[in-house]
Amino acid sequence: MKVPYIFLFLIFSSIYSIPLFSAPNDPVHPNLNQEIAVYNKIYVSGTATERAPRPEDGYERERKVSAYGEMKLGDSFSVTANYGYVDHYSTTRKTWSGWDRWGVGAKYYKKTDFASFGGGVQFFGPAVSQPKEADINPDLFLLRAYFGGLKQFGAFSVQATFSFESETNSSGKESIEENFKRFLYSGLTLSYSFTPKTNLLFEISHKTSAGDTITPYSDALIFAPGIQYSTNQNGYLTFSAMIQTRSDFNIDRGFKIGYLYFFGD
């Protein structure tokens, strides 16, 4: 569709038509994609998404409230933890609500004169509230590894991330009876410090299956224009709109709103 390309054009053209402000002390934090830098932060957010590809495939919507915390261990390392609550409605699957998967992780970040690079791992527990279905096993754990790069040009920055996610059992081994789902994620975040208090973002997030036993509509391509507004020296209100790209993709429209608070150095 044409609307996402209009947003891309406006963001790129603003780089040349508006004078650059001085670069922020820290890279702009993505609203949607995996971040690269390490922080002392708390991020509380709410996300609403829906999928309605074709009438015969039914309708699904999901509402999620999440809390994500990160603590730095020096300038290059940090540890993370997250938890949340999910309300899921579907006309073709079981409707459910309850606690989301808990997650813990670790990150590494390195600045160089040319650019910055980082990576990490995240481990997610079982989805205890989600019901079992023929193609869904919520008792399995999730393991996600990611890496990426960041480059700043004054008040403008580009962040790119790539990650691999796999289901696994408690022993970390795949048996003959189990067929784990695996996904590849990629994300691109373009950010611009429009004013000292306002950051403009345009994010692209892509998900594709890395196996041949994945349920229909597992893939996703999301275009997400967003904004961050500073409420005080350490806090930001955040908002991103998720724009539909193709009717046969999953989670193809919605929005995310949150509050991002940085503490310490």
Image (cartoon, rainbow, N blue to C red):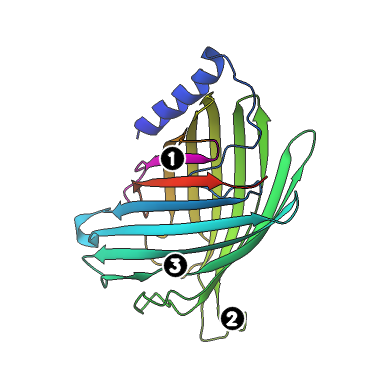
Which of these two is toward me, 205 or 215? 205
Determine whether label 1 and label 2 are within 8 Å by CB: no
Q: Amino acid at mark 3?
A: Ile
Q: Position of residue 241 (x, y in %)?
A: 37, 40
Query: Residue at the location (19% across, 56% down)?
Result: 55
Question: Residue reaching furthest right?
Answer: 113
Q: Amino acid at mark 2?
A: Glu
- Between marks 3 and 1 in the image, the one whose residue lies nearer the viewer: 1
Eyeballing the image, is 137 above or below 224?
A: below
- Between marks 3 and 2 in the image, the one whose residue lies nearer the viewer: 2
State which region is magenta. 233-248
Query: Residue at the location (33% across, 52% down)?
Result: 48
- Residue placed under numbered mark 1 in the picture: 237
Q: CA distance from mark 3 to mark 1?
A: 36 Å
Q: Amino acid at mark 1?
A: Leu
* Mark identifier at residue 214: 3
Q: Mark 2 Cα within 10 Å, few/some/many (few <14, many 20+)?
A: few
Eyeballing the image, is 46 above or below 194?
A: below
Q: Position of residue 66 (x, y in %)?
A: 43, 58
Which of these two is toward me, 134 or 68? 68
* Mark identifier at residue 64: none
Q: Secondary structure at mark 3?
A: loop
Q: Mark 3 Cα within 10 Å, few/some/many (few <14, many 20+)?
A: some
Q: Secondary structure at mark 2?
A: loop
Was residue 59 drawn as part of the magenta stretch in this picture?
no
Question: Can the viewer see residue 122 in this picture?
Answer: no
- Which image quarter is the N terminus in? top left
- Which image quarter is the C terminus in? top right
- Residue placed under numbered mark 2 in the picture: 174
The tag earlier along the polypeptide, 3 or 2, is 2
The tag earlier along the polypeptide, 3 or 1, is 3
